[in-house]
Image (cartoon, helix red, strand yellow):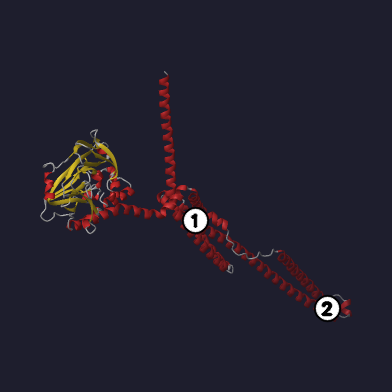
Amino acid sequence: MGHLLSSFFALLRRYALLFIGIVLILVCGSWLRGEWRQVRAVAAELPALRTAQQHADTVQARLRDEVMRDARRMSAATLPQLDARMREVDAAILRLERQQAQLRDPLALLRAGADTLPARLEQAALQGIELELRRQERAWLATLRSRLGFLLDQEAARRHLEGLRLAYLGEFQVQEVAKKQLAAAYARQGWFDRVFPYSATRRQLRALETQVAAQTARTDAALVRFRRQKALVEQLPRAPDLATLAIDERRLAAAAAPLAGRLRRAETFAAQSVAWQTWQVVKPVLGAAVAVLVSWIVVPFAIRAVFYFVLAPLAARARPIVIAGPRDGDDRPFHAWRRLRGSAPQISAVSQRLTLGPGDEMLIRPAYCQSQPEHVEVGTKLLFDWSYWLPSIAAHLWLLNRLHAPRAAEIVVSSTVDPLEEVALLEIPAGAAFVLQARGLAGVLYRRGQRPRIRSHWRLGTLHAWLTLQLRYLSFEGPATLVVKGRRGVRLENAGAGRLVSQDATLGFSTNTHYSTVRARPFLPYMLGRRALLDDRFAGDDAYYLYEEIPARGQAGYRDRNPLEALVDAGLKALGV
């Protein structure tokens, strides 16, 4: 029961963790998708919004200057000119209001799409700025017209007052003339006229008195009218000062607020978003990175094409490399290869028996000495050849077993570390030599005191050496028996008129061999990196070459090594290792 419960809870815990992982992945994916969508939107909108804002500011400054220039011009205009200008401004306001209504149409917004948002915001801001400026100009023009009408009314009142004053002065002058005539008539009457009331003089005096009284009444009425008008004129308020047009910047900012708000939100996102800041860092080098990537892909193919179609054909026409030819009158060492293991080209096996006679000495890597008789004396050889210490160390020919026996003994040599390796016994006759890459050497058997001599052969003046990066060749002179190792087997074949073999498989060749390189075919596998550029070509009568059946250098692990290892291997190959 306990085991069942523990299994149930373990299953429940596993699926709970799986569910939590799925939720976290979905949440992170949604967040990343949203961030990327915002980054794309800001990347597309921010430059356009900044350009739109700059254009809106420029247009606003230009329109402000135009409105202020028109205001200065209209400040001295007449009433008809003001009315005409107000009609023009009203028409402009009506036009802009219609355009704004069309811009806010939902169907127009759907047809325009989100990609035109900066352009639509810019257009709306420009229309809003111009509309607000025209409205402020219209209000100022209305104020200007009211002041001008007030001034005209005051001027008419003053002119009417002046007319009443002149009318009063006229009536007063007439009154004074009548009074003077009445005074003159009083002065002309006699005692009779004063006693007799119905005389002609008295009738004239009564007529003059009536005329003076009527004129006085008219004069007083004119004075009353003048004084009443004067009181009205004195009670009229003072005309307001002519104020210049003052642009309300806050209302202009409110008209362009959608564009400024969108730009402010985009800049805030750009300042706070890690994704946007990362995009800004990556964006300047993105083109260079793409160019480098394309070069990284294309340049190797171009270099391979140059090597394949230019350098390889040149190398094929170059003279082959011959390490050493037969001496005059003595071709025995080179005919001796015919007797090696009959006609069978494969000379290797999983294990080989090698006879160690009295007076013989054998140097062999410990991993290849499988068994030996008990009476065989085993010592240690620190380095295979001190004259060639670097090839000896690079080829693992150090800390070797040194074997010798007082009587004949059979030594079994075999690889104890690699199940695919086989070993071969290559007998080098006296006077002969064989070029061998030190990496293929596992041991050597020779007469004590007659250790095989190693010679260096530099070939710096041939294109074959430079294309294969093998500038030095090491030859082993007989008499000796070399223990050679190779994966899946080692083959020794007669070159004859010419044989081709993979360069990675080559282990060595006889010194009389005509060695050269030829271009590998076909082209496409080489271009895709599935095979080397060159194959080794061996030719010559009684010339032999040695190769392993599965080259270690062709394996995936060898080809995938890091650049430092590849550089070291190239240097060792150049030295013949």
566 above or below 96? above
Circle 2 — which element?
Answer: helix
In the visual, does 494 lie left or right of 133?
A: left
Circle 2/circle 1 CB separation < 8 Å: no
Camera sees residue 418: no
Specify the farthest residue to the top.
Answer: 1
Q: Amino acid at mark 1?
A: Ala
State which mark lies toward you, 2 or 1.
Answer: 1
Q: Residue at x 44, y 48 (%)?
A: 39
Does 125 sit left or right of 199 as displayed? left
Q: Residue at x 78, y 73 (%)?
A: 211
Q: Determine which residue is flagged by label 1.
A: 125
Instruction: Please tell me the numbered disc located at residue 215.
Output: none
Image-based side of 471 in relation to 126, left or right = left
Residue 525 image position (x, y, % from top left): 22, 48
- Please state the horizontal and vertical placement of residue 71, each as a whole percent of the image: 56, 66
Q: Which mark is residue 183?
A: 2
Residue 575 in view in this figure: yes
Amino acid type at circle 2 is: Ala
Rounded to the nearest angstrom, the CA distance separating label 2 from label 1 is: 86 Å
Say above or below: 466 vs 556. below
Task: Choose between 552 and 556: the one closer to the eye.
Answer: 552
Residue 99 at x, y = what percent?
46, 55
The one nearer the camera, 357 or 53, is 357
Q: Nearer the viewer, residue 455 or 402?
A: 402
